Amino acid sequence: MALLADTQYGFPGTVTPTAFASIMGNAASGSFGVGGLNDLKLTTNAVGDRGALLSTGLAYGHGCLGIWTSTTQFNFTAASGTSDRWDCIVVRRTWSNTPGVSVTTLAVKTGTSSKALPSLVMTPGTQTEQPLWLVRVKGGQTAIQEIVDLRCFSGNGGVQAIDSLALGYLNQVGSRVEVAGDLWEYKAASTTSSAAWQKISGEGKIPMWGHGGALSGSASGWDLMKIQAGSEIKTTDASGYVTLTFPTPFPNGLLFVAGFDGDDWAGGGSMMIGSAGRVPVYGTAGAGNKTQWKYAVKIQPASRDGVGSMRIARAGNFTHRINWIAIGF
């Protein structure tokens, strides 16, 4: 299935003043992209088996631009048996030295059972394929099961993609792409013999040079961490324990948490804060988990418990200020 663009610029014989202005305003900003959030947007429908409708819009790549002024109905072929198959809607550009022969079309590339980009043709000046949507069909089913947005949006020195699978066709050395709050860079190795995507920052995250074991969950593979901190007035229970609940739960685990005496005057002496530990009644919160931390307050002197000034003891029913910091992932 393929559908020719209603208007196309950038091929031999098509670069008029209007075409040049459109190219420089769109295709010059990145290797690939679509005009906006609603350009070439796919929605499933019940028009025939495994139906989906692609909206009008503009797509560009390698200095060429195509515009579709009519919606396009796609009906995907059935997968075999009861298996899944991931097909990909692409913009295919085919160049010719003969003016008027080059074409920009929409096409479907038949995929496999893996949720992945298909093998793409990427030879600018001959033929390229720009992924737009990944579509999951299932054998024995007449409706599309799932769609994945592979479009990207370029402008003013930045590129944004909706799904990390899009990084598979944006892999040019030096590229920086934001996906779901994370910023990725396609970086050359020190030997410049290879390159790979590296996550360099994230929304509300900081890069970690290194880390040890985690209090909750596994920190292995997490190179960007989240930090929370605050200052709270708390009162311990009769045994000297109190619960600190993090303002926002960490999504995957807790690396580290620590608390400090936030008010020496209120403490009435040296105040120490430590994890309650693996006391069964406190569960994972005793060491700290994704949502909260159970800690103990100890003070010296401990004349309040009648034992003597040199004793360090938990302080029950004790109001204090804790300054705290937690790192999670």
Image: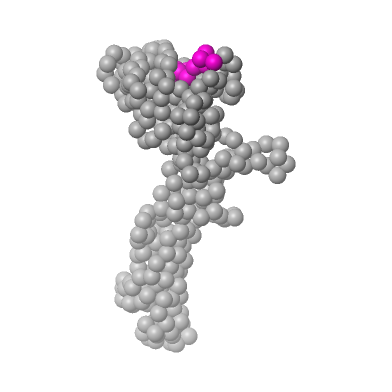
Residue at figure coordinates x 50%, y 22% from the top left:
14
The image shows residue 86 at horizontal and vertical percentages of 44, 22
The image shows residue 10 at horizontal and vertical percentages of 52, 25
The image shows residue 223 at horizontal and vertical percentages of 54, 49
The residue lying toward the viewer, choosing from 19 and 8, is 19
Residue at figure coordinates x 44%, y 37% from the top left:
153
From the viewer's perspective, is residue 258 above or below residue 32?
below
Residue 250 shows in the view: yes
The residue lying toward the viewer, choosing from 306 and 41, is 41
From the viewer's perspective, is residue 265 above or below residue 93?
below
Residue at figure coordinates x 41%, y 28% from the top left:
58
The color scheme shown is one colour
Of all residues, the one furthest to the left in this rendering is 46
Q: Quadrant of the N terminus?
A: top left
The image shows residue 276 at horizontal and vertical percentages of 42, 65
Image quadrant where residue 12 sits: top right
Which stretch did the figure color magenta? 99-109
Main SS, magenta region, reads: strand
From the viewer's perspective, is residue 131 above or below residue 140?
below
From the viewer's perspective, is residue 297 above or below residue 123?
below
The residue lying toward the viewer, choosing from 312 and 287, is 287
Query: Is residue 297 magenta-colored?
Result: no
Of all residues, the one furthest to the front in this rendering is 17
Counting labels gives 0
Residue 286 shows in the view: no
Residue at figure coordinates x 38%, y 23% from the top left:
68
